[in-house]
Image (spheres, rainbow, N blue to C red):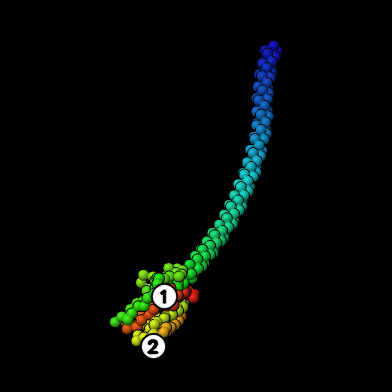
């Protein structure tokens, strides 16, 4: 009986130990299960957090892209405004340059006109008058050839176109000129004949012949002269011309207008 109880007791003890071990294992497994569930929840939380962070990063990336687009748009707008402003400045500069060029042209034209008027006025002031003898009484001629007359008593010589040393009038500019000449001679066997000469060409003649007393003659002409053309009076061969302090024999001319 005692042996049987002892065996029974041992069996019970083994069974209890086995149950305790199973309980411990089950408790461990339960604890592991609970920890696993906690880890799964933590993992889910981490996944959720990562998804939130990814969403946040995507939102930030979208905002950054939008900001970059805004910056690009602003830069493009500023570049367009700068280009437009540069075009306006260029247009204004071109307009100012054109206006300056036009002003310079007008100024040059005005200066040329002023210079032309000054020249016209200067060359327009051409006139002279001279009588044959510088002083006293006298008769020139007769000579055996045509002789250039030098009118030495200069009353006026505006523009210095007449030379009292050669008797030549030299046209300073192209234009219309008027000349007049008067002669006086004593009566006698010689006539008085004077011809106005242009560049060696006989133009007009004034002549007179008196058997006694004084004889006079005169003529005048308007000529188109080129600058440098020469006009003078020439006494015919075997003719005479007289002058005295009354200055009867004279040669005059003036520029009517330049051309």
Neighbour tally class for label 1: few under 14, some 14-19, many 20 plus, Cα within 10 Å:
some
Q: Is residue 136 left or right of residue 85?
A: left
The numbered mark at residue 119 is none
Outermost residue on the left side: it is 144
Q: Nearer the viewer, residue 10 or 205?
A: 205
Q: Picture coordinates of residue 169 (x, y %)? A: 40, 73
Q: Which residue is mark 2?
A: 211
Label whose residue precedes the other's in the sequence (2 or 1): 2
Badge 2 density bin: few <14, some 14–19, many ≥20, Cα 10 Å:
few
Q: How many marks?
A: 2
Which structural element holds mark 2? loop
Residue 75 coordinates in the image, percent (x, y): 59, 49
Q: CA distance from mark 2 to mark 1?
A: 20 Å
Looking at this view, is 223 or 184 the one in front? 184
**Measured from the top left, where is residue 158 in percent x and y?**
46, 68
User: Vertically, is 221 above or below 123?
Assistant: below
Task: Judge left or right: residue 178 versus residue 74.
Answer: left
Q: Which residue appears farthest toward the front when viewing the image?
A: 212
Q: Which SS class for mark 1?
A: loop
The residue to which callout 1 is attached is 244
Q: Is residue 247 visible?
A: yes
Tell me what residue is drawn at x 67 percent, y 27 percent.
Answer: 31
Say whether residue 223 is visible. no
Q: Residue at x 66, y 29 (%)?
A: 35
**Place of residue 2 in the rendered image (x, y in percent of width and height, measured from the top left):** 69, 11
Q: Tell me, yes or no, whether the two marked residues, 2 and 1, touch with CB atoms within 8 Å.
A: no
Q: Quadrant of the N terminus?
A: top right
On the image, which quarter does residue 40 sit in? top right
Which residue sits at x=53%, y=62%? 107
Is 126 on the left or on the right of 71, as rendered? Answer: left
In the image, farthest residue toward the bottom: 211
């Amino acid at each position: 009986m005692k042996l049987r109880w002892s065996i029974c007791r041992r069996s019970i003890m083994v069974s209890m130990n086995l149950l305790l071990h199973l309980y411990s294992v089950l408790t461990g497994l339960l604890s592991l299960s609970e920890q696993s569930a906690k880890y799964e929840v933590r993992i889910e939380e981490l996944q959720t957090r990562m998804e939130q962070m990814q969403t946040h990063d995507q939102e930030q990336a979208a905002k950054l892209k939008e900001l970059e687009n805004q910056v690009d748009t602003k830069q493009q707008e500023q570049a367009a405004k700068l280009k437009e402003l540069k075009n306006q400045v260029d247009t204004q500069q071109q307009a100012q340059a054109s206006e300056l060029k036009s002003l310079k042209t007008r100024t040059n034209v005005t200066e040329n006109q002023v210079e032309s008027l000054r020249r016209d006025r200067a060359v327009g002031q051409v006139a002279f008058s001279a009588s044959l003898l510088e002083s006293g009484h006298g008769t020139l001629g007769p000579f055996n050839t045509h002789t250039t007359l030098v009118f030495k008593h200069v009353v006026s010589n505006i523009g210095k176109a007449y030379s009292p040393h050669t008797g030549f009038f030299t046209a300073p500019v192209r234009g219309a000129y008027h000349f007049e000449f008067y002669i006086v001679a004593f009566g006698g066997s010689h006539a008085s004949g004077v011809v106005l000469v242009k560049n060696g060409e006989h133009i007009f003649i004034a002549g007179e012949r008196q058997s006694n007393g004084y004889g006079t003659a005169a003529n005048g002409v308007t000529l188109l002269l080129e600058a440098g053309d020469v006009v003078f009076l020439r006494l015919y061969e075997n003719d005479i011309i007289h002058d005295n302090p009354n200055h009867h024999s004279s040669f005059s001319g003036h520029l009517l207008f330049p051309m």
